[in-house]
Image: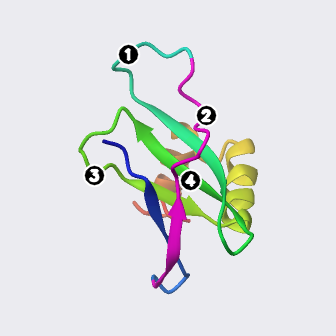
Amino acid sequence: MRRTTAPIYSKNGDVLGHLDLTGAHWQGGEGVADGVEVVEVAFVQHTDGVIYTAVRRTPPHTDEDLVMTYTPTEWRLFAARASTGYFDPEAVMERHREHGGSATA
C-alpha cells in the first residue's frame, strides 16, 4: 500500500504539516518495464496554498515507502543544479577527489 500523506519539514527538521497525496498525479514511471526502479515526482498543493514537490521510488521497497517533500525554492535549486550536470556520477567523483574524499561540496 502506498503512502497517502507525507510530512513537510522545516529547515530545522520540525514537521510543519502533512501533504495529502491521495490525488497526486505521479510522473516519471510511464513506459518503464514492471519491476524496474524509477523515481516519480508529483506537484501537490497543500492547504497552506503552496505547491510542494513530492518524490518517491517506484516500486516501493517496503509498505512504508519513503516520500520526500520539497518546497518550491528547494525544488528550483535542485533542478538548476541537475541541469548543469552537478549530480552526474563523474562530477560527483571529481568533487570527491578534489575535497579529499568529501563529495558534499
Most extreme residue toward the left, as rendered?
A: 62
Q: Range of the magenta residues?
A: 14-30
Q: Which x, y percent locates residue 101? A: 39, 60
- Indicate which disc residue 27 carries: 2
Q: CA distance from mark 1 to mark 3?
A: 20 Å
Indicate which disc, 4 or 3, sits on the residue closer to the N terminus. 4
| Residue at image mark 4 | 54
Q: Residue at x 56, y 53 (%)?
A: 54
Q: Residue at x 73, y 67 (%)?
A: 73
| Residue at image mark 3 | 64
Indicate which disc, 2 or 3, sits on the residue closer to the N terminus. 2
Q: What amino acid type should be assigned to the residue bearing mark 3?
A: Glu
Q: CA distance from mark 4 to mark 2?
A: 10 Å
| Residue at image mark 1 | 34
Crowdedness near tag 4: few (<14), some (14–19) or many (≥20) residues, C-alpha within 10 Å: many
Secondary structure at numbered mark 1? loop
